[in-house]
Image (tube, rainbow, N blue to C red):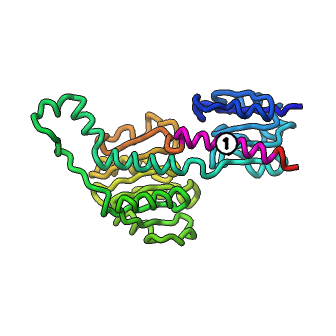
Amino acid sequence: MPKQIVILDTETLGRDLDLSVLEQFGEVTAYTTTTADETLSRIQNADIVISNKVVLTEETMRQCPSLELICIAATGTNNVDLDGAKKLNIAVKNVAGYSTQSVVQHTFAMLFYLLEHMDYYHHVVQSGLWSMSGLFTDVSRPFHELSGKKWGIIGMGSIGQEVARVATAFGAHVGYYSTSGQNTEHPYLNQPLDVLLSTSDIISIHAPLNDKTYALVNETNLPLLRDKAILLNLGRGGIINETDLAYELDRREIYAGLDVLEKEPFDPDNRLNGVVHKERLLITPHIAWSSIEARRKLLAGIVSNIETYLNKG
């Protein structure tokens, strides 16, 4: 009998991704999005469930007698009650490493946008101000080179290490802070957090969200940042206290690029929405992971996980 496969949130994977490859394993039912109230009815008869962000609780899984495998369409596993799945003998598989190059690329895209004041210069051209100036150039917003600058990395997993490698290729000097306190065997300067924040021109965050990293950057240490420093968060929302960051962005000239927020999508009441100096802030909608290549790797990882599970006997 063919397996019943349910995909709960295809919209998060992109409409350009060909999910028909999953049909080799059974009958596929796909939903663009799924609310908490809809989850149980949609997976109650499923053998295999694929979810990116839809939460699967022990109570829900307990009411799904056929469920044997959950494939998380992501690296993080916080949307599934892992202890509950283990109790119920339901296998849970995620996909690691698929988005490293995509996140690294987006890190540098955000950096250069802020570093070279791209928003301002785009406006100068589009508004006609450059055409009216009579000058061949516009140096009204001076910018620095990355070469020779100090780049501090918070979180030295695979993404942090690749950012360090690329930053070094640009001529930057890399230091880092290990959020676990254990990942310290790297050929870069290992520093305490306050030293890294106070001495870096660019700080990028590539750490997971946990008890050690929640609100790690906040009102007590944001004032340590150098004037004109650029702070990038491509780890998890919640690592930076967003209210404290909004205050600091308005208080003095620092810059921030955020691809992740504590509450997603962006809450209109978020204090960052009211930042006066909007040119100091760049927010993208959690897209760093989502290059075409990364999403194809993610799908290939899901397929591999299903194959491995079904062939385990």
Query: Residue 182, image x and y in percent?
Result: 57, 70
- What residue sits 44% from the left and 36% below the top? 269
Which residues are drawn in magenta? 290-309
- How many numbered marks have been drawn onto this rendered protein structure? 1
- Please tell me which residue is depicted at 11% across the width and 34% down the height of the picture: 133
Q: Residues within 10 Å of mark 1 (few under 14, many from 20)?
A: some
Image coordinates for residue 270, horizontal then vertical, percent: 44, 39
Asked if residue 271 lies left or right of residue 131, the reply is right
From the viewer's perspective, is residue 244 above or below residue 195? Answer: above
Residue 142, horizontal then vertical, whole percent: 21, 49
Q: Of helix, strand and loop, which mostly describes the magenta segment?
A: helix
Q: Is residue 107 visible?
A: yes
**In the displayed structure, does residue 68 sit left or right of residue 255?**
right
**Residue drawn at 66 percent across, 48 percent down:** 95
Callout 1: helix, strand or loop?
A: helix
State the residue at coordinates (79%, 40%).
61
In front: 187, or 31?
Answer: 187
Q: Is residue 6 magenta?
A: no
Residue 117 location, quadrant: top left
Q: Is residue 191 in view?
A: no
Rendered view: 251 above or below 135: below
Question: Is 166 left or right of 16, judged from the image as shown?
Answer: left
Q: Is residue 294 magenta?
A: yes
111 versus 152 height, above or below: above
Between 289 and 223, the one lying in front of the other is: 289
| Amino acid of disc 1 | Ala
Give the quadrant of residue 302: top right
Q: Which residue is mark 1?
A: 300
Quarter of the image where one finds residue 29: top right
Residue 229, image x, y percentages: 32, 56
